[in-house]
Amino acid sequence: MKMAVAKGSGLSLVALTVALVLAGCATDAPPPPPPPPAPAPAGPPVALATQVSDAAAVYVDYITTARNMRANFSDAQVVQTKLQEGATYQPDQLARGVVAYAAIVAMQEPSFRSSLRAYAADETARAELVRRLTSDYNYAASLPSADIAARRVILALSSDGQSVYNSGAGVKRAAYDVQRQKWSKEKVADRDGRLAQTKQNSVALRSVHSDESSRLLAAALTGTGLTTQATTGQSTGGYVIQGDGVTFTPETETAATTTDDQSAVTVPATKKLASAPAATDSAVPAATFASTTNVFDRPDLFNTPYTGAVNRALTIAALAILGEAGDSRTEYLNYLLDEVEGERCFDMSKLNLYQCLAVATPHFEDVFCLGQHVLMDTGQCLGKMSSNALSFEPAKIAATYATAEPYIKPAPVKKPAKKKATGKHKKRR
């Protein structure tokens, strides 16, 4: 019994010794590696004030309304409803929206973002670049890859302008066709009230759709999510002008994806140019029909100097990518959004609309005012804001206009009835 106890005690000592050895080995293990060092500062994150995305959302809302305006007029009420829908925009607000939307489009260009983020990582370089951008908004055009971002902007805005112009051309054409319906020749019941309502809608600010503003802001901050006409900065295929919007030529045979995820109509490969609208309603210069339908593939379309709208948009985009366009720069962003030339153009289209409605009497003349001065004039302004070389107005060629259908068909002249000769006035033999 004693030996058993002694033996058991010996085993316990051995186990204890082994445990101590193992514990000593554990304390001698190498310590875990230290945490990785903090990454080098990359500058402030991309920032854009919500006032810019709000302004862009208003632009998107109006363009969607205008480009979808169709020439289907069934009665006088439809005419008046569409007239007020199209006229409901305030020129200053829409011009600001053009610049804001263009800035978000420019921020979708990867090369433009990557080159500016390199400046953002260096505090001294970033401060100097911000100083230059805020001293002269034309400076942004000289930045690396600014030309590619500008191409995106020009194609996006000009495509929107072309769509609105084409919708107007279709509506204007309906001013002729609708005269076959009796109601269109009746007088507008309250002409003064209709004009007063149009003027009131022209000064009322459009409301901001918060969901659309949030979508645009997310696209600006991430650089993705906003589909534009050109993703490479190059024109991809030609365009055929139709009353229902911009479409690609048969060489692509696919629908064109326009800004805001709107798809245009595909033109069959057998479509002939002769079937396009008359030159007076076409959005293509008349001389173009003889050679090509590629309206935007022009060597001078992207030439510098860019328009004020494009330069201002590039500046906002550059500041935002550098992280310097947040709420702290509200005052300067307001200055950049105020594009005077675009506002003047929209103002002029409104004045022309007022004059047109002041003299229009039957309903079909209101259709003309809607097509020409609400839609076509507005689309033309968008074209002018996008490029110094772009115009949607047709070339005035005498041979073409000689056969153009008149806007108001004059009543046939009645020849006076010949008087029958009486006996008193019979010719003497």
Image (spheres, rainbow, N blue to C red):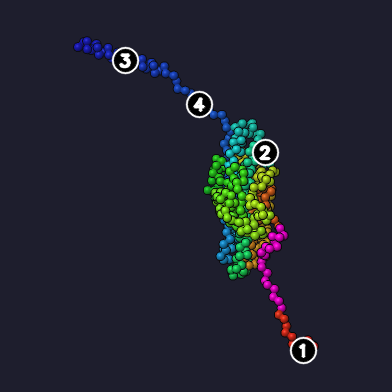
Cα gap from disc 3 to disc 1, whole angstroms: 159 Å
Name the residue tied to disc 2: 142
Which residue type carries mark 2?
Ser
Q: Residue at x 59, y 70 (%)?
A: 182
Q: Is residue 274 above or below residue 416?
A: above
Cα gap from disc 3 to disc 4, whole angstroms: 40 Å
Which residue type carries mark 1?
Lys
Q: Is residue 265 above or below residue 409?
A: above
Which residue type carries mark 3?
Leu
Name the residue tied to disc 4: 36
Q: Is residue 188 visible?
A: no
Number of other residues with Cα within 10 Å of mark 2, as a class: few under 14, some 14 to 19, many 20 or more: few
Where residue 426 appears, as percent x and y from the top left, is 77, 87
Where residue 276 appears, as percent x and y from the top left, is 62, 58
Q: Residue at x 68, y 46 (%)?
A: 300
- Between tags 1 and 4, which lies in front? 1
Q: Is residue 242 above or below residue 41?
A: below
Name the residue tied to disc 3: 16
- The answer to whether 8 appears left or right of 89 in the picture is left
Q: Residue 320 is drawn in which quadrant?
A: top right
Q: Specify the quadrant that holds the N terminus.
A: top left
Number of other residues with Cα within 10 Å of mark 3, as a class: few under 14, some 14 to 19, many 20 or more: few
Q: Earlier in the sequence, mark 3 or mark 1?
A: 3
Q: Residue 318 is drawn in which quadrant?
A: top right
Cα gap from disc 2 to disc 4, whole angstroms: 39 Å
Name the residue tied to disc 1: 424
Q: Earlier in the sequence, mark 1 or mark 4?
A: 4
- Between tags 2 and 4, which lies in front? 2
Numbered disc 3: secondary structure: helix
Circle on res. 317: none
Cα gap from disc 1 to disc 4, whole angstroms: 125 Å
